[in-house]
Amino acid sequence: DEPNVGVCWSKTHEAEFLVGMVAGRMTITNLLGYVGGFRIPVVTRNLNAFTMGARMVNPNVTVVVYFTDDWNNGDLEAYIGRLFILMGADVVSCALSSGQRLQNLFHENGLYSTGFGSDYGAVFGDLVLVSSLRQWGPCYIHYTTQIMLGEFQPHQANFYGIAEGYSDITQLSWRVPQEVQVEVSAMRKVLLSGSEIFCGPIYDNLGNVAIPDGKCLNNSEFISLEWMNYMAEGIDLRGSMTLPGCGVGMYSKLNEAFEFQGCEVCPPGTFTSGEEDLLECKACIAGMFSIEGICKRCPRGSYAPNAGASMCSECEPGQFQDDEGMDSCQPCKPGYFSNQKGTINCTSCSPSQYNPKYGS
């Protein structure tokens, strides 16, 4: 209600539609991952637009969606990212503060991502295919000009998109084929002409009419829960996710639908550190073993030659090992011997005896 306040907001959903087109063309598995902060109209609007763009160019695409109920939760984002990779998603997008952990995880696995709200490619590299942009410059110019001319009126709400310069996309990564770049550029020109995305008929992911034929949403409806409380066709909504909190030596057990079934102890020979929730246990390295999800060093007199050992083997007669966590045993040197398993130190020959060979 203050007399000196005005509002600007960007129709980022227009840019997200273009971003979705890129993702839809670049996926091989036809499975896209999407992480949203909160299920509110602005996030839902961007998600729906992304999905509509992807399915316009690739009707076989499914977008798997989780909400974190947080704008910045790196541990949870990484956990969801690992879920996506297990499911087979090969492009990930988000509506978060940055999604850094999510982006890095996909890139470390040679997979693509898209950015939201700023140029992620400038930060995370060329595996970011494209980013949507919010551009506030036109808003500042609009209000500054009004103030300079004495024409400012309070309580304005300026809600504009690509045509007015409030939203756009970055340059596409060189990894995006030229024909896809041409296709996206053509659609961008359509949006520059002022065309709207949310015009019916549009169906939700349950097959119901979300926006009827002949209806195009106006600015007030874009931000309304009444009109933006649906999930677009092609969305696989998994709901709000929380970290399972599986501890050291445990992992998140999933069913065939990748739904959490509880925490379980890692199989023998494997472990988790507990530093982050994991979906799979890792093999203990050679020289170590585990029986309850925690790797331990092989005791002296024993060894584990390979990764993933559930127990250590004792050194054979003629061998020894005087250190812990080793992947092999050493032969007794000449003048020393061992006549039993699990020797820590070889015994020297008596003064009246001599052993000329190694490993006796």
Image (spheres, rainbow, N blue to C red):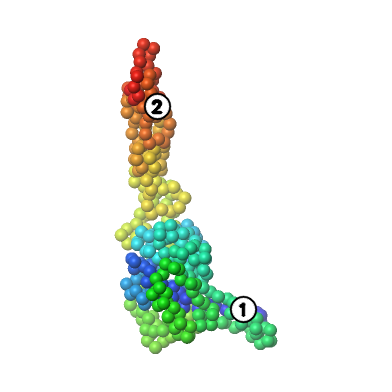
Label 2 residue SS: loop
The circle drawn on residue 194 is none
Quarter assignment of residue 141 = bottom right
Q: Which residue is mark 1?
A: 140
Horizontal and vertical percent position of residue 280 = 37, 52
Instruction: State left or right for residue 273 relative to residue 253.
Output: right
Q: Residues within 10 Å of mark 2 (few under 14, many from 20)?
A: many
Q: 270 above or below 21?
A: above
Question: Which residue occupies the foreground of this view, 36 or 125?
Answer: 125
| Name of the residue lying farthest toward the top | 352
Residue at point 38%, 40% (across, down): 286
Quarter assignment of residue 340 = top left
Horizontal and vertical percent position of residue 359 = 34, 25
Residues marked 1 and 2 touching at CB (< 8 Å): no
Q: 96 above or below 55?
A: above
Q: 360 above or below 169?
A: above
Instruction: State left or right for residue 224 relative to residue 335.
Output: right
Question: Which residue occupies the foreground of this view, 99 or 109?
Answer: 109
Label 1 residue SS: helix
Query: Can the viewer see residue 239 in this picture?
Result: no
Q: Which residue is mark 2?
A: 344
Q: Residues within 10 Å of mark 1 (few under 14, many from 20)?
A: few
Q: Earlier in the sequence, mark 1 or mark 2?
A: 1
Horizontal and vertical percent position of residue 63 = 38, 69
Three-letter amino acid code of the residue under disc 1 = Tyr
Q: 144 above or below 311?
A: below
Residue at point 42%, 64% (across, down): 112
Q: Quadrant of the C terminus?
A: top left
Residue at point 32%, 58% (across, down): 255
